[in-house]
Image (cartoon, coloured by chain):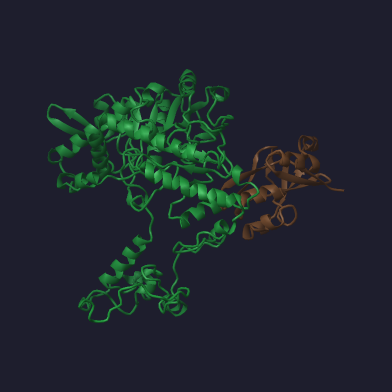
Amino acid sequence: MSETRYSKDHEYIRVEGDVGVVGISDYAQSQLGDVVFVELPATGKALSKGAEAAVVESVKAASEVYAPVSGEVTAVNSALEKAPGTINEDPQGEGWFMKIKLSNPSELGDLMSEADYKTYLASL
Amino acid sequence: MLNRQGRPTTPGTSDSAAPHTFTGNRALDQTEPLLFEVGRLETTGVDYEAPKKVKARLGGLARKGEIGLPGLSEPEAMRHYVRLSQKNYGIDTGLFPLGSCTMKHNPRLNERMARLPGFGDVHPLQPVSTVQGALELMHTLAHWLTELTGMDAVALSPKAGAHGELCGMMAIKAAIEAKGEAETRRIVLVPDSAHGTNPATAALLQFEVRPVPVREDGTVDPESVKALLGPDVAAIMLTNPNTCGLFEKDIVAIADAMHDAGAYFYCDGANYNAIVGKARPGDLGVDAMHINLHKTFSTPHGGGGPGSGPVVLSERLAPFAPVPFVRHTDQGFELVEDTHQAEKHGAHSFGRITAFQGQMGMFVRALSYMLSHGADGVRQASEDAVLNANYIRAGLADLMSLPFGNKPCMHEVLFDDHWLKDTGVSTLDFAKAMIDEGYHPMTVYFPLVVHGAMLIEPTESESRASLDLFIATLRDLAMAAKRGDKERFTGAPYFAPVRRLDETRAARNPVLKWMPPEPISEAAE
């Protein structure tokens, strides 16, 4: 069973066991416009919640992607470096950024559920 | 009796659509190839005799293949550049409302003064006894700049706005080092509404950048600054008027808070053109501020520059000003060239940031502008710049949305894209449609604190008639967007020399170097 939770900065984390797949939401990719560059963290890097985890650059602007939870980076989607457009085409599937092994699963409680995130988007 | 040759003198009668031309050109609208495509590798535009046999001494460094430079005659090279220049849009061809950039008219009197041989032909290594007039001009310009800003000293040498920022922050760093606090004061506060160069400058000097949020009304709250202050803060870099086109009304409280915490106040003076003669940064508590002569004081801009970014410094920072600077003595004007020499005059200069004295040509132009306008004239220029921006705001406020409410702005007015919601037209599309109307678009998607920003700065150069036509054009476009005439925008520009560029492809697959067609590239390898 996997569950997807969202941050106010439009990162998502899809949790499977003690590992979360992190990326940016469909809303985030539509706001950024065509993504032209991504910078991913090194595997093994320890991230604390809210720390800068990756950089995503579109034709409009460069933005930071923050770690939605604390943990260690266990894998990165290096295919994005050659094909950053995948983030626009399939943000919550093939366009994932990294996998994080959660060090403090209770932090997930600070994030929004799918339904709460939809309500949040409607308020923007 | 007239027209005996039978030459028709009335317009043609064809009502069919424009035909294709053999060349693909359309009269003056011509496709311009690259110089490499115009020229030919096997020819040359100059007629030199073949060199005599020389003994090669290049060893392994001798060129093995062809150099690949195109052969061009002088008229071919000339036509290429003149045709390119004719495709260009500049302040001399029309209204240029690029917000935050101050694209004001460059008076031709400035050009005439800059070309006087005593200014135009001086060399930076000439003996100072032969350039007394040029040094006096720099001294007079320095006096105007310190007098207008209410500051103690000015460094004229920085070559552009961002270079001026670097200079000002280096003075701040030197002052902090002199107090023995270099190890502890590591943080520079930068509001969200800052120019992008501000955090870049701080980062270049190895400071840690900490953002200050902007409050609801688009300005900085001194309480949010105070919340971030501590013994580890070196300075704040604040733009005033800010990039939302608003005057930071709590600037004095922010300055006091910085000083109480033992930190410094850097003001980004890119928008100083809104307040010249109205408010003196020195009275507002500013410690350092760069002045873009190429914005505020009408010297040329962009590709026509170069820029020039003198930095004014408060009493606290004046001793750390960079060399060289001009001093007036009984014997005339002298250049203080190095830090030892500066030490003799009680200064602790942080050193030199540029090879020579700065952009002399721009000093002449800026002072010409100041002297031809006078103190009252430069003040009126600021007033008119603010008036013009507000005239545009009032003319468009019922159709376009203002993120901070329909309140008076300074020299530029900021709209967001809220009013375009559900039209299918984006800020970018709207800007592209302005190109078809013959206008350079305003600044778009900056500042970042506003969604789909459109930042319009008309400057004082525009007449009321010119502003009326601009407003009428934008009203027509805005109404077209609202009634669903999407094509006019999403396909724009239709009438520019090139259509909409594929920015995504350019960013993902940048081609930065012209490569010759295949056979030649093989020969070169």
Percent position (x, y) of residue B262?
47, 20
Q: Residue at x 34, y 77 (%)?
A: B40
In this rendering, the answer to whether B259 lies above or below B470 is: above
Q: Position of residue B133 (x, y in %)?
A: 15, 38
User: Which corner quadrant of the image does residue A93 belong to?
Assistant: bottom right
Does any portion of residue B325 appear in the rendered image? Answer: no
User: Quick check: A24 left or right of B375?
Assistant: right
**Which residue is depicted at the point 52% across and 22% down?**
B231
Residue furthest to the bottom in view is: B5
Residue A37: x and y in percent read 59, 54
Q: Is residue B156 above or below residue A36?
A: above
- The chain displayed brown equals A
Where on the picture, by quarter, is residue B212?
top right
Question: Quick one: quadrant of the C terminus of chain B?
Answer: bottom left
In this view, the residue farthest toward the top is: B260
B20 sits to left or right of B142: right
The residue at the point 18 percent across, 46 percent down is B122
The spot of residue B270 in percent (x, y) is: 40, 37
Which tint is chain B? green
Nearest to the observer: residue B348 or residue B20 = B20
Which of these two is toward me, B182 or B145?
B145
Residue B159 can be seen in this image: yes
Q: Nearer the viewer, residue A121 or B202?
A: A121
